[in-house]
Image: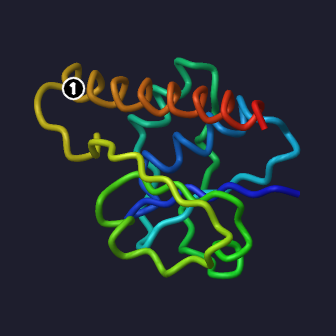
Amino acid sequence: MPQIYFLCTGNSCRSQMAEGFAKAILDPSWRIASAGIETHGLNPKAVKVMAEKKIDISHNQSKLIDSDYLNSSDLVVTLCGDARDKCPMTPPNVKKEHWPLQDPAQAQGTDKEVLDVFRQVRDEIEQRILDLNQRLNKG
């Protein structure tokens, strides 16, 4: 079974949103997981903006990187600079991509302004997952 691993520094909202979209969009034969270098609680704003897309990530749990899963993945996607810099070396047969995304949890302003940042990052992740799906289906 092919595997995709989404990594972010804190298994933050970015990797959780990517996992949510990937499970909703990609072929169900793909095994999909997310993890981080540190564990963080799931941000309620990420849950809210994903629910707007009819994707429930409220039960996702923050996980630390599992080296066995990392080494057996077909694709590792990092979603922030720290993850790309700190991730363990992957074997040569593991394809790696980096999606440099703003950390919406660091957004400041009114509640509406912060939610707008979450939505912007969410929409960018959705588009990247759609693009990934198209590439995977081309073979």
What residue do we see at 67% from left, 77% from top?
71
Task: Pinpoint residue 63: horizontal percent, then vertical percent.
Answer: 57, 68
Tag 1: amino acid: Asp
Total numbered labels: 1
Task: Pinpoint residue 76: horizontal percent, then vertical percent.
Answer: 58, 60
Question: Quick one: which residue is furthest to the left in this view?
Answer: 109
What residue do we see at 46% from left, 51% from top?
42
Q: Quadrant of residue 102?
A: top left
Please give left or right for residue 7 compared with residue 58 in the image. Answer: left
Q: Quadrant of residue 40?
A: bottom left
Disc 1, SS: helix
Task: Pinpoint residue 74: horizontal percent, then vertical percent.
Answer: 71, 60
Please give left or right for residue 44 compared with residue 117 in the image. Answer: right
Q: Quadrant of residue 5?
A: bottom right
* Nearer to the camera, 76 or 28: 76
**Placement of 107 over or under 62, stated as above or below:** above
What residue do we see at 52% from left, 28% from top?
126
Q: How is the image coloured?
A: rainbow
Q: Quadrant of the C terminus?
A: top right
* Nearer to the camera, 97 or 139: 139
Please give left or right for residue 68 compared with residue 109 in the image. Answer: right
Residue picked out by circle 1: 111
**Pointer 1 local density, CA inside 10 Å: few below 14, some 14–19, many at least 20:** few
Q: Quadrant of the N terminus?
A: bottom right
Task: Pinpoint residue 86: horizontal percent, then vertical percent.
Answer: 36, 76
